[in-house]
Amino acid sequence: MTLDSMTSRTQRLCSLMVDQGVDVVLASAPVNMGYLTGFFEGSHERLMVQIFRRDGSMEMVLPALSEAQAARTGIKNLHPWADGVDPYEIVVQLIQSWGLKSGVFAVDDFLPSFHLLRLQDELPAALFRPAGPILSNLRAVKEAEELKKLTNAGRVADDVYNELLPKLRLGMTEVQIEALIREAFVAKGTTPTFCIVGIGPGSAEPHHINGNRSLSDGDLLLLDFGCELDHYQSDITRCVAIGHASDKMKTVYDTVYKSHMAGAEAIRPGTTGAQADAAARNIIEAAGYGEFFIHRLGHGMGIEGHELPNLVNNNHAPLEVGNCFSIEPGIYLPDEFGIRIENCGYCSETGYVSFNQPAPAEIPVISAS
């Protein structure tokens, strides 16, 4: 993260604070602090907050345990506290010195409630409100540097998938396949973040918990996984048939593939999340599988695997250049199989650009023998 990036983000933060009548933003989640200042460390139960004022200044109250790391990041105006010291008094003293005891405080959505309740007790005249509408919208439009990092993370996920297929063998369990995927991410210098491996009926559970079911001839295998690279995420889903694909598998895969492509083609600046969702959902509904597409078309992507904007039927906000999200329609047939096709990408001036390689137009069949 460059100094120019930090300055630009702080300037945009201040502009949003002015627009929304906010005096102070309290950022506490590593993803928010990291986005704004490059400092991604968490503090467990201890109070750690970056306090931004709308004049662009920032003070950080943090455990003394983290002072050296924060200073190394280049953060100034540190207020470290040692165990046994009341950190809330430090925050209150800062607020009082600014004359903002009755100000409007936007609080990070991830600040633990026991911290917030104590701050509310210490500052009874202050008005506390969620900072999500500020911080989430700030992070939703990616800069060129962020798009590059997301592209790199996406390419690693592609490589892991392509390298996995020749290693699959009949009799392998879901947890064994998961281990192969996680090991591959680590070998490539990334951090695996999640891994869903659904065999047969397990593939019909969108958030399947991996178990000991093993690969057999004729199974549908669903793979949904991602990693973190330079603090940015990847997330892809692919489906393959083992040995052979039934006619029903081919039909469902073809429907989901066409839905995926329709969703991607609908992406333009000004298109809403609801419109993109409808473009993809219409394909599945027309094929008679509408009741089996049980989730939104996509979620935002960035420092977190799920952030704004969402491609969902109640999101009527227009997409902007730099918005990043998944496109992942799916059909889930209980006790049979499920198929989901997912790439992540962004809205450019001319349309959708994927971070991943294109998904196969027909269901891949592998021998796994």
Image: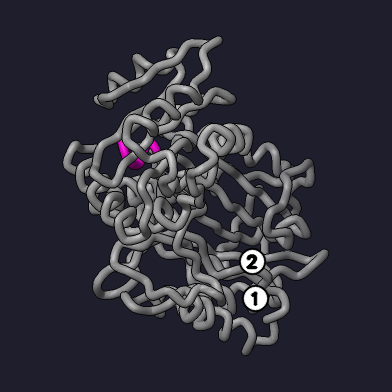
Q: Residue at x 68, y 81 (%)?
A: 290
Q: Residue at x 79, y 66 (%)?
A: 336
Q: State the quadrant of the N terminus.
A: top left
Magenta region, residue range: 33-37
Residue 167 appears in the rendering: yes
Type of amino acid under label 2: Ile
Q: Quick check: is 323 in the magenta stretch?
A: no
Disc ID at residue 252: 1
Residue 243 screen position, x and y as percent: 67, 59
Q: Residue furthest right?
A: 335
Q: Main secondary structure of the magenta part?
A: helix
Question: Which residue position holds label 2?
Answer: 339
| CA distance for labels 2 and 1 | 7 Å
Label 2 with label 1: CB-CB less than 8 Å = yes
Instruction: Indicate the secondary structure of the residue bearing disc 1.
Output: helix
Type of colouring: one colour
